[in-house]
Amino acid sequence: QVQLVESGGGLVQPGGSLRLSCAASGSIFSILTMGWYRQAPGKQRELVATITGGGTTNYADSVKGRFTISRDNTQKTVYLQMNGLKPEDTAVYYCRADRAGWTNGYWGQGTQVTVSS
């Protein structure tokens, strides 16, 4: 029932910045835990960051200090501000919505982030 649409990906040089957005449908956004995940070619999908409805955040060690996840419950949107981008950040980034009691979360379609000179 939850639909997610990511945007903001693109090509950026090393050291640059991008902000990803994920717009969600539905009336329960404020109580969902939202997350960003990424998957590089030939690699397993990995967690990047999560944020609870109450604003508690969690980050992968590889992005701590560089990425910031935030949300706007009025706009039903979650953001990922990415600074100091590195080539190893290149991946398809997926937005996810989750909630206690759900067996599986909902996924967006993904947005490509490419960090290259």
Image: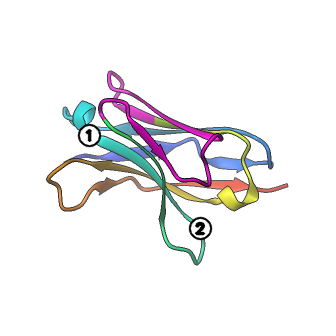
Mark 2 element type = loop
Residue 86, compared with residue 45, is above or below; it is above
Distance in Å between CA atoms under marks 1 and 2: 26 Å
Bin the neighbour count of mark 1 within 10 Å (Cα to Cα): few under 14, some 14-19, many 20 and up.
some
Q: Give how far across and how far down residue 56 sits, in percent.
A: 38, 35
Which of the 4 image quarters holds residue 33? Answer: top left
Magenta residue span: 53-78
In the rendered image, which residue does mark 1 sit on?
32
Residue type at mark 2 is Ala
Residue 47, compared with residue 75, is above or below; it is below
* Residue 73 shown in magenta: yes
Mark 1 element type = loop
Furthest residue to the front? 61
* Residue 39 shown in magenta: no
Q: Give how far across and how far down residue 108 sits, in percent.
A: 39, 53
Q: Quadrant of the C terminus?
A: bottom right
Look at 70% across and 61% down and name the residue there: 88
In this rendering, position of residue 67 left or right of residue 46: right
In this rendering, position of residue 12 left or right of residue 56: right
Circle nearer the N terminus (1, 2): 1
Look at 31% across and 29% down and name the residue there: 54
In this rendering, position of residue 91 left or right of residue 27: right
In the rendered image, which residue does mark 2 sit on?
40
Residue type at mark 1 is Leu
Q: Give how far across and how far down residue 104 sits, in percent.
A: 23, 61
Look at 69% across and 56% down and name the residue there: 114
- Which scheme is used to colour this image of the protein? rainbow
Furthest residue to the bottom? 42
Q: Nearer the viewer, residue 63 or 38?
A: 63
Look at 26% across and 40% down and name the residue there: 32
Which of the 4 image quarters holds residue 58? Answer: top left
